[in-house]
Amino acid sequence: MGDGMEYVALTGISERFISELKQNRLLTIEIRSPHNFFAALHLKAGDLLFLTHTSSDDLTAGSMGIIAKLIRHQVSTHRVMQSSELYYEEREITSLRLQLDPKCIARMRKVLNNTLGEITKVDAEEIPLYNAR
């Protein structure tokens, strides 16, 4: 097994998305959860990150995930308006779209930071995959 490396982690990702990534597809994910939003906000194209379906509360050594390379990073804000006879409400919803290129399956070795409002960071090691790419 390889040495561990430090990665920004996105947690609580749907199992369906993770299994699509495992099939070596370039995929775009839309991030709305505050925890993952702040973690991913300052990433740049080319950065590697660790995605896992494990929630941030349950993150421990041994958690499995996928290491993916960030291809595109786009912040978008949508305006949502609702009104009735009694009120008029306008809201903004900001989301982050990340286009990811999966690299390999990985196992977490240790949690480096998992404080609410801060960037979740983990130490993870690659698990070699024999893929015909």
Image (cartoon, rainbow, N blue to C red):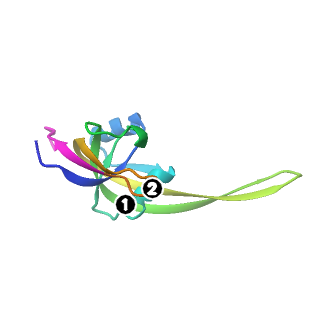
Q: Position of residue 24 (x, y in %)?
A: 26, 42
Among numbered discs 2 and 1, the one appearing first in the sequence: 1
Residue labelled with disc 1: 72
Q: How many marks?
A: 2
User: Above or below — where is 46 with respect to 5?
Assistant: below
Tag 2–tag 1 contact (CB < 8 Å)? yes
Element at badge 1? strand
**Of all residues shown, which one is farthest toward the left?**
1
User: Above or below — where is 27 with respect to 117?
Assistant: above
Q: Is residue 127 magenta?
A: yes
Name the side, left or right, on which 59 lies relative to 97: left
Residue ID at (37%, 53%): 120
| Quadrant, the C terminus | top left
Magenta range: 122-133
Q: Position of residue 129 (x, y in %)?
A: 16, 38
In this view, the residue in front, 35 or 45, is: 35
